[in-house]
Image: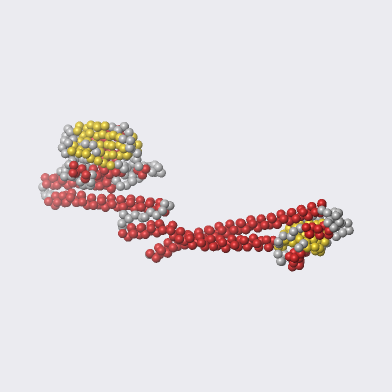
Amino acid sequence: MGLRRLRLRASVRTRVMVALVLLTTLTVALAGTIAYVLETNRVDDRIRAVLQDSRAEFDKLATDGIDPTTGEPFASAEALLRTALSRMVVQPNEAMFSMLGTEVALVADAGPTQQWITEDPELVAAVADAANWERSRFWQVSTQVRTYYVAAVPVAPEPGGTPGALVLAWNLDAEHAELGETFRTYALVALGAIAWMALIGWFVVGGLLEPIKLLRTAADEIATSSDLSRRIPVVGNDDLAVLTETINGMLARLEEAFASQRQLLDDVGHELRTPLTIIRGHLELMDPTDPVDAAGTKDLALDELDRMNGLVEDLVTLAKASRPDFVSPEPTDVALLTDEVLTKARPLGDRRWTLDGLADVTAEIDPRRITQALLQLASNAVKFSEPGSTIALGSSATNTEVRLWVRDEGVGIAEEDLGRIFDRFERAGSPAEGSGLGLTIVRSIATAHHGRASAESRLGHGTTVSIHLPLVAAPEMLPDPADPDGPTDPAPDESPSPDHPSEPSHHAGGEPSTTTLENR
């Protein structure tokens, strides 16, 4: 498997390099071809321009020139052609000669040009009739020896004389060969550059693929060891680094989810064992023939089952607390929410229910979850206070956070127990019944809002449990705008009701509230 993956990584690296080299080669070749075509056209245009200039000079000489031997205008085509050839400068790869009738008369700079004419009779044959043409002509002549660009300018004869023509021929093969030599050098330099690029690119691509190697290695180690606490090192700040951070975030969420699952299983196994043992023991000892014993055992079993049902509901709530859709913040009038919770809490017990204050602000919170938390605290306050005592709810706000609290005049909590009342199954020595999960749920709701829960208490004077929440929800708490229906699994309203309140958690509160020693 390891060798196969190694080959796969090398294959990816090789494919990237092959694609890169091919793309670069095609680009360089295309650029060279286009440049060669453009340069070839430029050379051809330059040759045509030179021939046009030469024809213009010859026409001016024929019209306005003076025969240097007589001092008079040219009297014959031969004299004009001889004078023209003597004055024109023959450039490399160019031939100039005159025709009288169908024969070559004079050759300018007879060295190389004479050799062309001797070697290539097809060139002479192509211009043999030029003296008889009515006008000048420019065209390309291809022979077995070479390719020329030719200009032929006919000269009218004197009365009774022989017609002539000036012929200018340019060796296109030689001109293009010089250009080809330049582009052969370009091709060699380009091939060297491509080879150098491939060598450097091999190591660069390997470095770019290194984060992927780290991702694969970490994934293998996590898969084999089931250690979700491992994190992948973030290398650089490119897209692969962002991918690594995303995978690390996914691993963190998976670790949290598995931890929550393990905690749920541990809690269920720990807390359900006792009521199941009680029910089993009483059923084994029950006398089915004794109606009183049977009825008592039935009532006890139903009571334990009710307690187990409440425990399971609380555990499910805590398991959901780590999910991103546990809370659904929305703009909420805090004063109105506080007043509504007080109205819902009154049936929980015979107490003097009052308001300590109302925060006239709108906060981004989940009203259902906050109501659930406050009613849990109110249920705790009832559980750990005497009938007729005061239980107060209140809210206040600053520029950055809102605070909601429940205050009672109950038994209070010892100072040494305040630090652990929000822990799971923590009853802080309270004899009251309950699972010890109530305050844990309250803290989970506050934490899901990116807030916190706190408690203040004095033994014999009461307890205040407070929930501190930010006024504005964190971006990750807001609903996805692409999902107008909101979370697919909205949390049910698990607020304690007057008829069947969720078992109160150890009353702890952010304000002086008299709550209990038990974390429900």
Q: Which residue is drawn at 72% across and 60% down?
A: 91
Residue 395 appears in which quarter of the rendering?
top left
Residue 75 lies, with reference to residue 315, above or below; the image says below
Camera-side residue of 318 and 394: 394
Q: Horizontally, is 506 left or right of 234 in the view?
A: left
Residue 88 visible? yes
Camera-side residue of 500 and 125: 125
Q: Horizontally, is 72 left or right of 193 in the view?
A: right
Residue 4 appears in which quarter of the rendering?
bottom left
Q: Which residue is drawn at 27% across and 36% down?
A: 404
Image x and y of residue 509, in percent: 23, 39
Residue 361 lies, with reference to residue 88, above or below; the image says above
Figure label count? 0
Image x and y of residue 361, in percent: 32, 33
Residue 497 visible? no
Specify the quadrant that holds the N terminus.
bottom left
Q: Residue at x 74, y 54 (%)?
A: 53
Camera-side residue of 484 and 403: 403
Q: Horizontally, is 230 left or right of 393 in the view?
A: right
Image x and y of residue 167, in percent: 77, 59
